[in-house]
Image (cartoon, grey):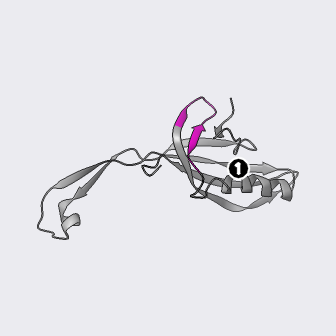
Amino acid sequence: MASSFKGLNLFGSGPHRFSMGERSRRIVSLATLTQDVSQAGTLEFGNYELRVFVRGRLVAGNELAMRGLRDAIVAQVDAAVGSGLLKDSYGQQWDTMKLISFEEFGAVSRGRELSVGYVVEFGQLASG
């Protein structure tokens, strides 16, 4: 089973792994909200939005192919692009996810193939 986002194989060119972001509730002190350090207590504002990270390497045979891999991911980062189903290689899936960011790490390694490290952040945003 291949990983995908909205049915697109964005990460299959090379090794990649999924990880979950922090899962917690939003707790804010009254002192922070009121800017009055004498205020005691805290308020709960529900759960933080779900975050899923994909870390891996894009691997391509040439510069043009590498550009195509990057462009396919970056096209999904645009705020106007809707949310979709995110699936990992093991069958876990997350509904209504948006691709929030794409970042490359290091220079492109050049050998028989080109490769570059990356991290992609997905969020299940309350704003849809």
Where does label 1 land, which residue? 57
Is 126 left or right of 107, judged from the image as shown? left
From the viewer's side, name the closer residue of 9 and 59: 9
Q: Is residue 72 magenta?
A: no
Count of numbered labels shown in the rendering: 1
Indicate the position of residue 96 as horizontal and vertical percent values.
Answer: 52, 42
Seen in the picture, residue 124 relative to 105 is either above or below; the reply is above
Q: Amino acid at mark 1?
A: Arg
Q: Quadrant of the N terminus?
A: top right
Seen in the picture, residue 31 relative to 66 is either above or below; the reply is below
Judged from the image, the secondary structure of the residue bearing numbered disc 1 is: strand
Q: Quadrant of residue 80?
A: bottom right
Q: Residue at x 19, y 55 (%)?
A: 42
Is 63 left or right of 24, judged from the image as shown? right
Q: Is residue 91 magenta?
A: yes
Indicate the position of residue 26 as horizontal and vertical percent values.
Answer: 31, 51
The crowd level at tag 1 (other Cα within 10 Å; few <14, some 14-19, many 20+) is many
Q: Quadrant of residue 4?
A: top right
Region of the chain picked out in magenta, as a range: 82-94
Q: Residue at x 66, y 43 (%)?
A: 16
Q: Residue at x 37, y 49 (%)?
A: 48
